[in-house]
Amino acid sequence: MRRTTVLGFNMEKQIARRRLVVAVYALLAALLVLGWFLDRFGVTGSIYVYFIAMFLNWKILGGYGPNGLVKPFNGKGPRNEPIPSNLMELELYRYGNLDPDAPDQYRNDERELGRRDRVHYQAYQVLAILLCPIWFIAQWEIRPVHFVPPHLLPILLEWIALPAVLLAVTLPQAILLWTEPDFTPDPHEEPEPEPIPAH
């Protein structure tokens, strides 16, 4: 974890991070239901829900951007560094964690890289399971079956595909926040000085 607060709430305890994950998914579920009732997952119901999930991911969960609780998975800092001068530097910079000038708070160590790979593996196992019903429904639309009414197939497809997309965006960070133990500061680290109160 890079930060320990979200909207002023302390996230050092595992229970607080678990509540945050539950709150994010409860909000996304409520938005899915609202999007369905609003326009049956038309433009408003699906596109806006997706962008809200991306915003929550970017500002709160992290992982794929410079903000949020989880450090960026690629180990790169914000794009304020100079452009690499040759193709070799560009390739090394592009394919992760080889940027020696990246700030320490963005660079991932071996433990963090291992956790990143493990949570992506766990998340995409869930997504692979969700791809099976999507494939079945697509096959049933091409070759209709008698035991599923034809008007039900697009509804089923929407109710499985859109949550799968939202999980693809947020699930690795959610697993990481859910499983990470309580944050304890390093005893060798110097404590930050107390802010001086303004009178």
Image: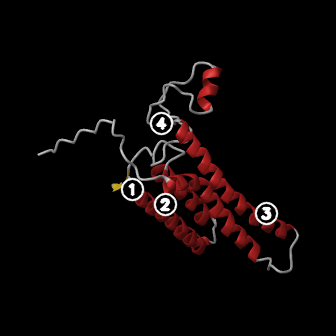
Q: What is the CA distance from the residue labelled 4 to the residue labelled 3? A: 38 Å
Secondary structure beneath dot 4 equals loop
Secondary structure beneath dot 1 equals loop
Q: What is the CA distance from the residue labelled 1 to the residue labelled 4? A: 22 Å
Is the Cβ of the residue at disc 2 closer than 8 Å to that at disc 4? no
Whether residue 54 is visible here, answered yes or no, is no
Amino acid type of disc 1? Lys
Secondary structure beneath dot 2 equals helix
In this image, 115 relative to 184: left or right?
Answer: right
Amino acid type of disc 2? Val
In the rendered image, which residue does mark 1 sit on? Answer: 13
In the rendered image, which residue does mark 2 sit on? Answer: 21
Which mark is first along the chain, 3 or 2? Answer: 2
Q: What is the CA distance from the residue labelled 2 to the residue labelled 1? A: 13 Å
The circle on residue 135 is 3
Determine crowd level at label 3: few under 14, some 14-19, many 20+ residues with C-alpha closer than 10 A: few
Amino acid type of disc 3? Trp
